[in-house]
Amino acid sequence: MSADATTLGGPRSGAADVLVRFARNHAWTLGLFAFLAVLLLFTKYVNSYYNLVSLANTATSVLPLALAAVAQAIIVMAGGIDLSISSQMALVSCFAAILMQAYPGDLTAVGIVILALALGVLLGAINGGLIVLTKVPDIVVTLATFFVWAGFALLVTPKPGGAAADWLKGLVVGSVGTDLLPKALIMLIIVVAAIWIPLSRSRLGLSIYAVGSNRLAAFRSGVAVNRTKFLSYVIGGLVAAFAGLSLTASTGIGTPVPEPTYVLISIAAVVLGGVSLAGGVGGVFGPIVAVVVLQLIRDDMTFMHVDPNLGLVAQGFILIGVLVVGSLVQMRRSRA
Amino acid sequence: MTLTATDLLLEATDVSKTYGAVVALDHASLSVQPGEVHALMGANGAGKSTFVKILTGAVTPDTGRIVVRGRERTSHSPAEARRNGLVSVYQEPAVIPDLDIRDNLRLTQTPIEPFRHWLNELGLEDLDLSSLARRLPLAALRIVDLARALALEPDVLLLDEITAALPANLTEPVLRAVQQQGSDRSVIFISHRIIEIAAICDRATVLRNGETVGVVDVTAGSEDTIVELMLGEDTTALGHKKAAGAAVDRGQQTPRISARKLSDGRRLRDATLDLYPGEVLGVVALEDQGQDELFAILSGAERPVSGSLLLDGKAVSYRHPADAIRRGVVFVAADRAEALLMQRSVRENISLPFSARIPQWGWINMGREGRKVDEAVETLQIDARAGAEVRRLSGGNQQKVTIARWVASGVKTMLCFDPTRGIDIRTKNQIYVLLRDLATAGAAILLYTSELKEIQLVCDRAIVIFGGEVVAEMAAAGADEAALLRAAHNLKSDAELPEEAVAGTVAEKAAVEAAVDDTSTRASQP
Amino acid sequence: MTAATGSIGGRNWLRLATLRNMLRDYPLVPLTVLLILLVVVVQLVQPGTVNANWAANNLRQAAVLAIIAGCQALTMLTGGIDLSVAYVASMSGFVTATFVHQPGGWVLGIVVALTAAALAGLVSGIGVGVFRVHPLIMTLGMGLIVYGFSNVWQLRSLQTGAGVPAELHTLGAGLTFGVIPNDLLVFVPVAVVLILLLRRTGYGRMLYAIGDNPTAARLSGVRAWQVLVVLYAISAVLAAIAGLIQSGLSNTASVTLATPYLLPSIAAAVIGGVSIFGGRGGYSGTIVGALILTVLTGFLSIILPEPWRQIVFGSIVVLVAAAYTRVTGES
């Protein structure tokens, strides 16, 4: 096509155009939502007792995983990946739990929570710093720090133990007002909104997308590439710390050995949630929905009295299936 | 208009940069006066782009001093360079594909109103700022990049081949905009189109092999000086004359390749051409006129949306380059980064096509392979001393490796896309000789080149592509630079090129100013 | 770096660059030096540790890791990765064990295990090669699927019982003449095949080509999907073989037996000089990398309690990778 200036841009957009553009930009998330809706219908069919309250309870159980997915999403958007997320969570979780056991008291617990968050920031900073300074690929660095954080978690507490302050537990257990509004859901919304909304509107947020989308163009546009990558890990570490705290809050203790499937599922949720592994595309909302979808599939397996292991199989299939379809769509689109 | 010898706006001295075995810049220097449009010229590979990258912080020099408005300022990042007043617009737009234009502006803290002003000036008033950058055509992105740079009002604006991807109707406003920079700001303008340089530039610094070989005032007649400086004493070496072949009667011959109305649904609209065995057919076009797509289709890398393709008279449809290669149609890419396995050895690169098909996946006969590779290396005179990793070879040698890959197994039909881009003169000549030899031996060669001189040096005839269609065909004899350039812009043979149009206005302006100067000086005389 | 004089540069520069190039071209040299240094350190810190028995144990253990690391080396050469190896390896050992009391015996079990692995690998390969799904995700998904199916299989076979066949145990754990591990009988041929595959076959060249520059490969007529489908099948079969040996070595059959091998297999390949971006590296380096890691983990488990073991292990991986990147000047 010869670049005819007058054919670019087109007529000024009206309300319909805004809607269309919104739909196009968020096509993936909308599709995922549709899938979730279908899944909910299926669940209701399989288990007639399932209702919105049950859905709300699901929110409670996936809180840690949802937060982990958000952390991973932010890092992946900048073009990186973090294989050490689950052990970051374990370390922060144990750290908080042991301290709260040693120094009980509601006020001290506040201080401990703040310390725990700072620890998460530190862990993220070390990850990001190593990646930027040594120029070793993200996968390798975070693979190695996975062990380091897990080791420290074991140092903090060789066996699951510790305690959690009551108010902390109260933040995620139970619901507010009606059963439809579990506290976990509220906490999820508050934490994610507090971090993501300012981030996505800020220059740092734009820089994160820029670096993930095209590192060279970002560099030439004057973006501080290294600093952006570093900060994406720092923020990821902060959110992972929240995830670890939510683990402690919901279980009441700290478990030093990270759940083996956490990392893989966080990556799966991120990809299912529409965040491209190549970076530059996506948001945090999609991965959260994806986490719910994955959990719902597991629940469905239980309701159908199907072997939970087949639930794993199903998750694997869905993950791959979605991506195959996604890439087919991509291939078709790039040919159009 | 006289320029008083005020303080220089920009002075770069002793700038050097070496990449491994390649010396990109060798104590080069550049000085720019305020208010001037300064051309930075040199053959491909002379170091222009590296210089720009150093000035604007994208690359750190090994040595060098950069002084802006009297203060020493070496920039270590594009952001820092911007603070120092240096902004560049590269050939590849520095626009983030996954963000819309508005966000791209926010990212670089570009003020919107000036940006919109420049968009209007450059002819893109209708651009919707909420369009995703990925969805805009390349020409639009380059204008956006340029408008963004202009809106920042830098002290020194560096433009690296800004008009390369632009159609004629956008070229003119760009050149005018370059002219309109204030008297305390300057533009460094890289282009290899002498006509453009002559039209809008005041002075020119010429680089050759990484060194500054001359600074010239751009006036009528200085073109020859510039060209001579660019090419050095090898000017005569360029005069490789091909044997003045008698006009071949093509009437009876079946063309090796016959394309009819090929289209890829986007840039290539309707390409029709015939390529005969034993000839070198040149292809000329401005950037992005569909020539990339044409070559991709002919070599099997892409499938056409419509049209037909005949090989030796029989219809063919390729689904993969392997299909074309199997039938003897091979492709030599311009971008060596695209064609070479940089981390692998010369040997692996040359023998790459040998092992591609499943039957060849088995044991390699190292002796036989070694002989074939050595033969090819010798034929092309490749200096493969650094042979363990092709990345370490010089640009010219790298390009020879890409050609050697096909020569090693005998060439029937070769599609060469700008094979001599960025290569030294000596290697260029070697490649020209090779292409002619291949043609004489019966191969059919299609040669796209961005250096118009090559057409008369190497080709028997030439076709010109514009807007996705073949708009002209000429015999080599009549295919001089001016004729080709006119055809490439799709202008009638006597029409004015955009550069000439701008030059005309500039000349008028200068004449008027000179007249005003005269009257005022005369008036002030007692 | 001082200014260049002449067309190549000052003497200092030349030496540095040549050294770098040498290290890039012969990565085995610094690796072997590192291994020897490690062994020396072990002997110094705990005198008497290094003897024939110790060597045999390490070799025996390293053989399993080296085979699984081979899967990573091969896939990483194409710019991919295989996260399903641990689950496939575990599945293989486990399935074989469940056939012990069946007609056909464990031999049939091996056949079934290898076939199942090859099938899983084929699916992964089709996903990566044909549908362009990112290898990380594809193999992750396949891993979960294999893991799930293994668990289901486990439930089905609880009745019939399972046990590691004695022959496998001898193969995996036995020592001939007290010093030569039997599993070398499997490992050495595998290693030879892999090394020759990479260096002397057209297929090996294809792996490097696709990893270095997929565009160039395509333009030269390489159909990447064919190469990749075969690749992931090979990787899965290799993992299955490793799983058999591991099962014999530890005389257990479990669906999670090999999970601890996943991350170390990646580390071994990286340390061994295989670039995660593809296009460079080889199997011989990976073998040394596996040896280094095995000696290291063994050493650490003697002198350090578990937590510190992990911390030091992770730190060393980062250090070695960083040193490698710095020394070879990878960008």
Image (cartoon, helix red, strand yellow):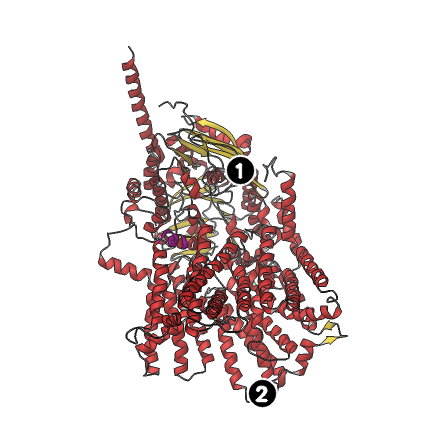
Q: Which residues are magenta?
A: A202-208
Marks 2, 1: nearer the viewer: 2
Q: Is residue A293 left or right of residue A127?
A: left
Circle 2 packing at 10 Å, graded few (<14), some (14-19), many (20+), is some
Image: B335 above or below C287: above
Q: Is residue A205 magenta?
A: yes
Answer with the quarter of the image where residue C41 lies: bottom right
Q: Which residue is labeled 1 in the image?
A: B242
Image: B104 above or below B24: below
Answer with the quarter of the image where residue A111 lies: bottom left
What's the amino acid at mark 1?
A: Lys
Residue at (64, 42) in percent of width and height: C14
Same chain assignment for discs 2 and 1: no
Which of the pair B40/B280 is nearer the observer? B40
Task: Say what secondary structure mark 1 lies in.
Answer: loop
Residue C161 numbered tag:
2
Q: Is residue C46 magenta?
A: no
**Parent chain of label 2:** C
Residue B383, position as x, y percentages in the image: 62, 44
Residue C294, position as x, y percentages in the image: 65, 66
Q: Main secondary structure of the magenta part?
A: helix
